[in-house]
């Protein structure tokens, strides 16, 4: 038996019970998309087949379908420039430039739009004798405000973070 699309419209739910019912039904919700923000340093290419990069990973994620789930991927480029949002980026171009984990877009937190954040770092380099170079402005270290926002996002939104880097400071 199939129900018409408006079959549930005739039922009224008291506002008092709405939150409880929605919480109970949450495990049964089908997520059609997983939104992933990929954050890269400037040394990491996002175009497939170009130098040292992750373009093929981005391409594969966007083409993958697992059951009813697909992946939407946006790219954020971590630079020393002022944070900016690119409204219509090319397929392998960053949506966010000068990215900071605490940046906003139209008053809303950028990272709150995503379920996962994947970070691919390269800065400062592979030549350090000690960790002093990590905190230099040219290395674009995360600020305390950024780290606090990221920690809050993981705790409150239950977001997942994957982070890796190709340098000897890890």
Image: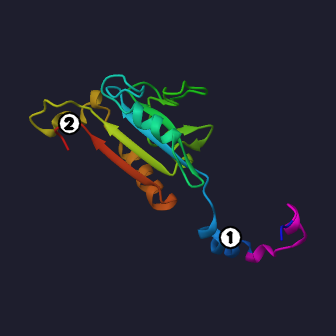
Q: Position of residue 35 (x, y in %)?
A: 54, 46
Q: Is residue 128 magenta?
A: no
Judging by the rendered image, the residue that carries numbered circle 2 is: 167
For the point 48% across and 27% down, the residue is 92
The dot on residue 22 is: 1
Q: Is residue 5 magenta?
A: yes
Task: Assess disc 2: are there few (<14), some (14-19) or many (≥20) residues with their C-alpha within 10 Å of its C-alpha.
Answer: some
Q: Earlier in the sequence, mark 2 or mark 1?
A: 1
The quadrant of the picture occupied by the C terminus is: top left
Q: Quadrant of residue 53 in the image?
A: top left
Give 150 or 55, whichever is nearer the viewer: 55
Number of numbered discs: 2
Q: Position of residue 41 (x, y in %)?
A: 35, 31
What kind of element bears circle 2? Answer: loop
Give 122 or 81, whichever is nearer the viewer: 122
For the point 67% across and 76% down, the residue is 20
Q: Is residue 43 left or right of residue 129?
A: right
Magenta residue span: 4-17
Q: Is residue 111 above or below residue 21?
A: above
The answer to whether residue 147 shows anywhere in this view is yes
For the point 52% across and 31% down, the residue is 95
The quadrant of the picture occupied by the N terminus is: bottom right
The dot on residue 116 is: none
Q: Is residue 94 above or below residue 163?
A: above
For the point 85% across and 60% down, the residue is 5
């Amino acid at each position: 038996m199939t129900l018409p699309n408006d079959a549930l419209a005739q039922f009224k739910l008291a506002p008092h019970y709405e939150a409880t019912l929605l919480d109970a039904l949450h495990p049964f919700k089908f997520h059609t998309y997983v939104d992933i923000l990929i954050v890269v340093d400037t040394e990491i290419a996002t175009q497939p087949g170009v130098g040292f990069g992750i373009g093929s990973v981005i391409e594969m994620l966007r083409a993958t379908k697992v059951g009813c789930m697909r992946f939407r991927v946006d790219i954020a480029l971590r630079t020393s420039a002022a944070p900016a949002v690119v409204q219509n980026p090319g397929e392998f171009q960053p949506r966010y430039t000068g990215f900071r984990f605490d940046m906003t877009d139209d008053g809303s937190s950028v990272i709150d739009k995503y379920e996962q954040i994947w970070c691919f770092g390269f800065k400062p380099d592979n030549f350090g004798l000690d960790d002093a170079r990590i905190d230099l402005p040219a290395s674009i270290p995360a600020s305390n405000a950024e780290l606090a926002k990221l920690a809050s996002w993981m705790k409150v939104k239950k977001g997942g973070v994957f982070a890796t880097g190709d340098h000897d400071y890890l």
